[in-house]
Image (tube, rainbow, N blue to C red):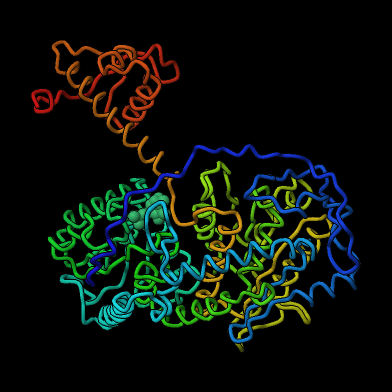
Amino acid sequence: MAALSGLCSSSPSLKPKHDRVVIPLFRKYSLAFPTRSNSCSKLSVAGEVSADLSKTNSVGVLKKAKQGGLEKDPKALWRRYVDWLYQHKELGLYLDVSRIGFSDEFVAEMEPRFHAAFQAIEDLEKGAIANPDEGRMVGHYWLRNAKLAPKPFLQVQIEKTLDAICKFADDVISGKIKPPSSPEGRFTQILSVGIGGSALGPQFVAEALAPDNPPLKIRFIDNTDPGGIDHQIAQLGPELASTLVIVISKSGGTPETRNGLLEVQKAFREAGLDFSKQGVAITQENSLLDNTARIEGWVARFPMFDWVGGRTSEMSAVGLLPAALQGIDIREMLVGASMMDNATRSSVLKDNPAALLALCWYWACDGVGSKDMVILPYKDSLLLFSRYLQQLVMESLGKEFDLDGNRVNQGISVYGNKGSTDQHAYIQQLREGVHNFFVTFIEVLRDRPPGHDWELEPGVTCGDYLFGMLQGTRSALYANDRESVTVTVQEVTPRSVGALVALYERAVGLYASLVNINAYHQPGVEAGKKAAGEVLALQKRVLAVLNEASCKDPVEPLTLEEVAERCHAPEDIEMIYKIIEHMAANDRALIAEGDCGSPNSLKVFLGECNLDELYA
Ligand SMILES: O=P(O)(O)OC[C@H]1O[C@H](O)[C@H](O)[C@@H](O)[C@@H]1O
């Protein structure tokens, strides 16, 4: 594993300054918006949308009314379409922003912010501490063009890791590296254990790009749900013996991932298999996971770099190793991402698709997340794009404080599955119901590989229907003043998927600058983890109290109040009730009297007395 010296140490977290809280001046739009003949300047959301006019989010034009409805004149709309259409020729990617109603005045007013955003991302790429709270550089762009890395040793790390991934994948696929006791004599399955950024990218890419018969099939354990874990292991059945288990965790200490690993190791023991001969770790050097893998002598270890965040790690070993093992061309993914990176470095708004996206988001969401982003790929293989983007966008943009310490509660909510399927689920509400969203259509032009298409009715293919559904929904929504963006790609290929990932990574980075927040930390995630730890600590005390009562002769069933009192936690009685309810449902506590529907009637005890525990 490449050395990470000098990069693993993070400086102490710099807390945001909370001394100055800006109270946003929420107000209804009421002023007239200047009308333009060839733009969609006549928006009809007056009275519906509030804007945060705080220092960080105020844009003069956003104070003005979005009145009169979106542009509906077909000729003017076509001019707008042509005028704003972005095309990346080599990638075969288009971005249509014509169905977002921003005006030229708005674009002009946003210009200084974009200049600042372009500068910030340029600095980031040059190695600035772009994640100030964690004192970290943010280097996911270097992963697809190592020459951009600000230090030669970083370039070497990136290139060496990529070569190691390719070599390892080739050796596994060819059977040079093989499991010790599989009848097939080679690995046939991957079981990926990881969560959040250590799962969502690999899941999205597997769904999008894995061939129908990959050299290794992939499954995921991305939770601490015992039922889900059992299901994955049961599905593997005897193929557990030919399963390569990839444990992915940047920190190397995420509880869900650790639990997944322990459960899988137990399954290996029960099957008489040696886990170490089938385990691979992807993690930061010297993390708990890294040390475990090293000490136990796992098959391989790959590094996660300090300067790559979980949600932007798809082009690191996290995304590349599982993809390569499935026979996906990872160098093509990197090429696509790199080409998109080049395009999105442009400081000319119209030539920069990520900036155009960020502009649309700002307009549609008033710079304060007032609307949700609905992602609708009209392609089954892109089903998981919205889930992947959910973390990328929401964990990056969903922040309480801005970079100056002002409370801003930023974010944009993301959801969606795929079209046309969702037309039969929630598009009804999008068309006619609460107007709290904008849509991003993802269009894929190629329906099937050449030579496989056929007309299921005269002149019409199955793909024509899908195309018609997308266009119809886009038009129907627009007719009812629902805005949308359309991203079009020729095909779902490693290159276009790499480009899509890079497009959204950059759009998120730029948008974060527009609203002045740190996109690269996630302080809010800690609260839930800490609270979960406290629940488990309380459960241990409850168990000890119940054990003591259950070791008495005769056994002494306890009421909830008695348990809470003996735990010295009367204020936690509700949580104690939930703990006991959960234990009872799993046969780990027995109900002597009453039932869980009437908490005050409950009396509980443990089925067995644990003397070791009692005298521990
Ligand atoms: O890769 P890991 O360290 O296991 O982290 C997995 C996930 O943990 C947390 O929930 C973070 O908020 C995510 O950003 C991260 O992707």
* Tally of numbered tags: 0
Foreground of the two, 145 or 319:
145
Tell me where residue 346 appears, x and y as whole percent: 60, 77
Residue at 64%, 65% (x, y): give it. Answer: 357
Tell me where residue 270 appears, x and y as whole percent: 17, 54
Decide: is 212 above or below 430.
Answer: below
Residue at 57%, 63% (x, y): give it. Answer: 510
**Could you tell me if residue 195 is visible in this image?**
no
> Position of 567 compared to 144: left or right?
left
Residue at 15%, 63% (x, y): give it. Answer: 294
Q: Quadrant of the C terminus?
A: top left
Residue at the bottom extreme, as displayed = 451
Image quadrant where residue 527 sits: top left
Residue at 27%, 61% (x, y): give it. Answer: 8
Image quadrant where residue 447 sits: bottom right
Decide: is 55 above or below 234.
Answer: above
**Could you tell me if residue 344 is visible in this image?**
yes
Tell me where residue 341 appears, x and y as whole percent: 52, 76
Tell me where residue 475 appears, x and y as whole percent: 80, 64
> Position of 613 compared to 479: left or right?
left
